[in-house]
């Protein structure tokens, strides 16, 4: 329920049902993302790729995500052919079981709240990992540590988070000894958190389905990582 701009959820499913972005619900946004995903995958599967088309795809994804205005200058100053090379290098590492995180820096392949959206559409089993999703994952990790009386957050669960543009909204999951670090425009650490989150969510979902094969959300929808991502995005609005 919503009171004084705060949302309270009983479960991930409850949060998923409340997902809202750009004046559209989950189903409406999924339709847009599915169309973008098909275009992006078809593009990267081509033998001969047009670098100018690559630029337009980045622009389209960033506009959907509301981050084009803050990334436009940085994207536009890079040669389109270089964008293509850097994106394909990043896609390779995001799909790898042994990723080279050194690929992600401001001179090579980028990772931020914009590029994570592109990689999630170009790759398999990759979530969109922005500040809100990171905040929600941090909250869940903190609850896990509290329940098990851990002294601190293990490095494997120390998810990076990002602050809201509205300073009144708290997205820092830190509390007591459980400290979580902001992105601080660190591409490598952002990519590391994104990849770790992908692996954990995929594994958790597989275990849940193994224990309860008929598990669904919203009565009839088989759960996938995009739905979990949507739930996390909703939870991370404000902690």
Image (tube, rainbow, N blue to C red):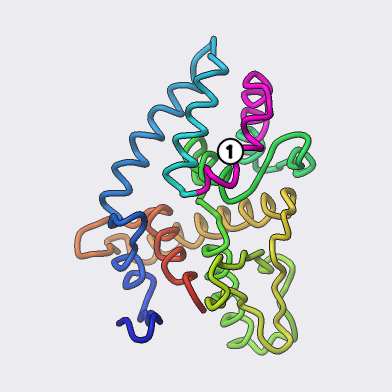
Q: Image quarter for residue 1? A: bottom left
Question: From this viewpoint, which residue is outermost toward the left?
Answer: 219
Q: Residue at horizontal 50%, vertical 20%? A: 53
- Image height check: is 126 above or below 15? above
Q: Position of residue 45 (x, y in %)?
A: 49, 20
Q: Position of residue 83 (x, y in %)?
A: 64, 26
Let me know if residue 129 is in the magenta part: no
Q: Is residue 219 left or right of residue 25?
A: left
Q: Position of residue 117 (x, y in %)?
A: 51, 45
The span shown in magenta is 67-90
Task: Name the residue nearer the viewer: 24 or 143.
Answer: 24
Q: Position of residue 217 (x, y in %)?
A: 28, 64
Q: Residue at horizontal 71%, vertical 42%? A: 99
Task: Name the residue nearer the viewer: 164 or 174.
Answer: 164
Q: How many marks can you see?
A: 1
Per the picture, the main secondary structure of the magenta-coloured stretch is helix
Q: Residue at horizontal 25%, vertical 57%? A: 221
- Image height check: is 132 above or below 150? above
Q: Is residue 169 left or right of residue 97?
A: left
Task: Name the residue nearer the viewer: 213 or 15.
Answer: 15
Identify the residue position indicated by label 1 in the image. Answer: 72
Q: Residue at horizontal 68%, vertical 54%? A: 190
Q: Secondary structure at mark 1?
A: helix
């Amino acid at each position: 329920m919503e009171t004084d701009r705060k949302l309270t959820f009983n479960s991930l499913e409850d949060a998923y049902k409340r997902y809202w972005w750009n004046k559209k619900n989950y189903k409406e946004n999924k339709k847009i993302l599915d169309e973008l995903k098909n275009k992006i995958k078809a593009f990267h599967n081509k033998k001969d790729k047009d670098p100018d088309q690559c630029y337009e795809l980045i622009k389209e994804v960033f506009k959907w995500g509301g981050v084009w205005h803050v990334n436009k200058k940085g994207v536009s100053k890079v040669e389109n052919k270089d964008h293509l090379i850097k994106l394909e290098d990043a896609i390779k590492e995001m799909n790898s079981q042994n990723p080279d995180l050194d690929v992600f820096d401001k001179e090579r392949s980028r990772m931020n709240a914009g590029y994570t959206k592109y990689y999630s559409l170009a790759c398999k089993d990759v979530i969109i990992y922005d500040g809100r999703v990171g905040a929600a994952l941090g909250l869940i990790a903190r609850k896990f540590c509290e329940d098990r009386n851990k002294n601190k957050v293990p490095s494997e669960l120390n998810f990076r988070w990002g602050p809201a543009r509205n300073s009144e909204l708290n997205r820092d999951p830190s509390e007591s000894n459980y400290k979580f670090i902001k992105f601080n425009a660190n591409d490598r650490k952002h990519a590391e958190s994104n990849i770790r989150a992908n692996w954990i969510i995929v594994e958790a979902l597989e275990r849940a389905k193994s224990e309860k094969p008929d598990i669904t959300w919203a009565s009839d929808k088989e759960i996938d990582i995009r739905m979990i991502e949507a739930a996390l995005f909703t939870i991370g609005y404000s902690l």
